[in-house]
Image: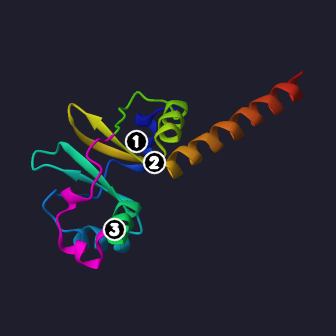
Amino acid sequence: MNVKAILDEKGHNVFTVKPSDDLAAAASILAKNRIGAVVVTTADGKIAGILSERDIVRAICEEGADVLGQPVSDSMTASVKVCDETHTVHQLMEIMSAGRFRHLPVEKNGRLNGLISIGDVVKKRIEEVEREAEDIRSYIAAG
């Protein structure tokens, strides 16, 4: 199972914000859509960063509520790890575990092509394990 298969099933739609949008607008998108992160993109669709709920909480804790009026670019993670459609579920687990993050933008031809969450990865891994168990049961029953 790879990223392409996950995106083919779940879709390529990603909530995005611009670096100049304020944190309040980004927080509103997160809350309204019940998501944990938005990808920050430039006008031409390139990934400029990622902004998570944690980033917003950290900014408020450090600077107070007035930070909500500041641009996303001040609080986003600019050094974003990305994956492509060929990455496997196992590779995603390694990347996300090592980096201690829950969202991984998918890049294709230098532009945003989707977003993989830890929930997507766990779901696919569970499906793989269940399929393997069923294959073993079928093999034993046929033997």
Q: Residue at x 41, y 61 (%)?
A: 54
Q: Is residue 83 above or below residue 42?
A: above
Crowding at mark 3 (Cα within 10 Å: few <14, some 14-19, many 20+):
few
Task: Work out whether residue 36 or residue 140 is closer to the camera in this orientation and state it.
Answer: 36
How is the model colour-coded?
rainbow
Q: Position of residue 119 (x, y in %)?
A: 53, 52
Q: Is residue 10 above or below residue 70?
A: above
Q: Are marks 1 and 2 in contact (CB under 8 Å)?
A: no
Provide the secondary structure element on which disc 2 rests: loop
Q: Give the residue type at disc 3.
A: Glu
Task: Work out whether residue 97 or residue 110 is closer to the camera in this orientation and state it.
Answer: 97
Q: CA separation, marks 1 and 3?
A: 40 Å
Q: Position of residue 76 (x, y in %)?
A: 27, 55
Q: Give the residue type at disc 1.
A: Asp
The picture quadrant where one finds residue 82 is: top left
Q: Position of residue 130 (x, y in %)?
A: 71, 40
The residue that mark 3 highlights is 62
- Tell me if residue 25 is in the magenta stretch: no
Q: CA separation, marks 2 and 3?
A: 20 Å
The residue that mark 2 highlights is 101
Could you tell whether 132 is left or right of 84 in the image?
A: right
Crowding at mark 2 (Cα within 10 Å: few <14, some 14-19, many 20+):
few
Q: Earlier in the sequence, mark 2 or mark 3?
A: 3
Provide the secondary structure element on which disc 1 rests: helix
Q: Earlier in the sequence, mark 1 or mark 2?
A: 1
The residue that mark 1 highlights is 8
